[in-house]
């Protein structure tokens, strides 16, 4: 399984979600998209996004002011 990375640092809501939605279209089902964001609102946004779209939020963590999300494309 390969991993895809989306760097959304410096972008504010709703851009990280919109870019992730677009990037997921290029990720084969079953593979993981890693998103890096500096928007604190993205924590709640990506949780809600996965519930709405049926994709799996595999990981949600932060290191300093960078938030990292791993979403498994299942939808």
Image: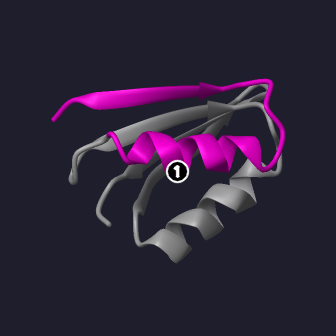
Residue drawn at the location 64% of the way across and 48% of the way down: 18
Magenta span includes 19: yes
Residue 25: percent from the left, percent from the top?
Answer: 37, 47
Magenta span includes 47: no
Residue 14: percent from the left, percent from the top?
Answer: 77, 50
Q: Classify residue 38 by image quadrant.
A: top right
Q: Is residue 63 above or below residue 56?
A: above
19 horizontally vs 4: left or right: right
Q: Nearer the viewer, residue 73 or 60?
A: 73
51 horizontally vs 55: left or right: right
Local packing at callout 1 (Cα closer than 10 Å; few below 14, some 14-19, many 20+) is few
Q: Which residue is mark 1?
A: 21
Residue drawn at the location 84% of the way across and 39% of the way down: 12
Residue 21: percent from the left, percent from the top?
Answer: 52, 51
Residue 1: percent from the left, percent from the top?
Answer: 15, 35
Quarter of the image with the C terminus is: bottom left
Q: Is residue 41 above or below residue 27?
A: below
> Residues in magenta?
1-26
């Amino acid at each position: 399984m390969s991993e895809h990375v989306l760097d959304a640092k410096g972008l504010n809501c709703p851009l990280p979600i919109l870019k992730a939605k677009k990037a997921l279209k290029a990720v084969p089902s079953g593979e993981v998209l890693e998103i890096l964001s500096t928007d604190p609102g993205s924590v709640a946004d990506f949780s809600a996004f996965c519930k709405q779209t049926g994709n799996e939020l595999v990981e949600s963590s932060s290191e300093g002011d960078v938030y990292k999300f791993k979403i498994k494309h299942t939808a």
